[in-house]
Amino acid sequence: MDLRNRIDTAPMSRAQLWIIGVCVALNMSDGFDVLAMAFSASSISNEWDLSGAQLGLLLSAALFGMAAGSIFVSQIADIVGRRATILWCTVFIAVGMGLAAMSTSYEMLLILRILTGVAIGTLQACLNVVVAEYSSAKRRPISLSLYTAGQPIGGVLGGLVAALLLSEFGWRAIFLLGAVINIALVPFILRYVPESIDYLVTRRPNHALAKINSILARIGQSAIPELPTARTAISVAGRWGQIFTGRSGLITILISTAFFMLMAGFYFANSWTPRLIVVSGFSDENGVLAGTMFSLGGIFGAVLFGPVAARFTVQRSLIVAFLLAGAGFVAFASSLFSLSTAITAAAFLGFITSACMAGLFALGPQFYAAEVRAAAVGFVIGAGRIGAILSPIIVGALLDGGWTADSLYYLFLVPMIIAAGVIVPLGNRRFTGKVETTTTTTVTEQSEPAQPVATKA
């Protein structure tokens, strides 16, 4: 009885497309939620007369929370279920955004941004897993690329709406809109997002068989007469042990390193590209245009990575993408003699770094068993968040030490080469072990404890 193989090999049903669509919409909302502070920063600073350090903490607060949520809190999804975690995180984000709109002090807003970030980080880890589990093997790279594109799309659309809200209603309206969007998505979660089949097989909650058959009917699969043989329950310590020991531990280190390097470079470029355009002698409006083109390029990069990966494999496509990302950093640093050249280079840099992000999101779930998948994916994404947090701090120190802004873009060639290097062994079956499916664990009738997909039986 191979439930995972059924989903991997069958054409995707309309119900599965709805699942992917709701997850994309939630990631779009997260893209808006994360950037809400950036959209509001100037207005908040003026209203409360904040120092540069205080504003910097506010801008970083959500990233700190997202790292904590991805690394520490996301494992709750392996215990209580992916669907419940997605639902309650969305509600928590809505409450956090609503309270942020009513903040009466800097300290209150800072705490709310951290807590909201924890929920966003936890939610994103779960969404990544659900998209992977409910996609067929053939369509999984495309599904995860569309999911990844949701965040920059949400950021771009959110920026357009935020500009109108700021001029008419002030910064609080931006957070209020975030709350309304998240609440509006709750009925879609309840209606279209089922529990993970892998979770139901592994954790076996009450009425697990009936729930599995109900989901199978929704996605056009035949029912099963009984549950597969029960697996040995795994403790929290065992869950972390399975992620960090043996071959799985090496895989976790490699994927975490790639995420760390990518997010360090991505968030540096996302933050500094408009500024570098301005200090190079162009106008503030030109800086905004460069930032917008970076985001628009990111949307296309995330979407197009899927078809490329479906043809050439995720690992091979990622290696090439990381090397091109390194070239993109060099190209942008060398392009500032002309505005049109710089804008084109910014769009390409956004395109290729977002393609790398889509690839890593597709790669992450493939090496871990169902009972640890959310925790493992949460950890490797959280490692990337740490890179995103540390990158601005390191960049600031280097600038204080005499580095010029354009020289820093040359520096980020190194992390991209390192990221490409750590992906190389992940495509080698002698290193990873025999991969049973494209991205997820095979569920079969056997009594031994589940092994990571990347481990030989």
Image (cartoon, grey):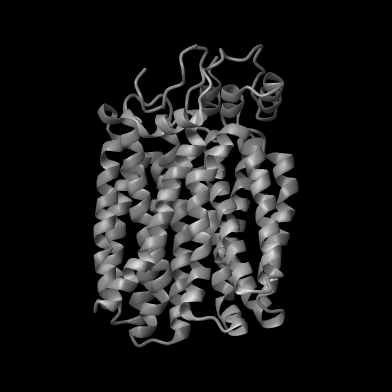
Q: Nearer the viewer, residue 130 or 43?
A: 43
Q: Nearer the viewer, residue 316 or 393?
A: 393
Q: Is residue 321 above or below residue 222?
A: below
| Residue shown at the point (46%, 21%) measured from the top left | 450
| 202 horizontally vs 300: left or right | right
| Residue shown at the point (51%, 20%) measured from the top left | 443
Picture coordinates of residue 454 (x, y %)?
A: 37, 28
| Quadrant, the C terminus | top left
Q: Nearer the viewer, residue 421 or 387?
A: 387
| 375 horizontally vs 404: left or right | right
Image quarter of residue 109 = bottom right
| Residue shown at the point (45%, 61%) measured from the top left | 298
| Residue shown at the point (33%, 48%) measured from the top left | 257
Picture coordinates of residue 397 (x, y %)?
A: 30, 72
Q: Is residue 348 visible?
A: no
Picture coordinates of residue 51 (x, y %)?
A: 50, 81
Picture coordinates of residue 232 (x, y %)?
A: 51, 18
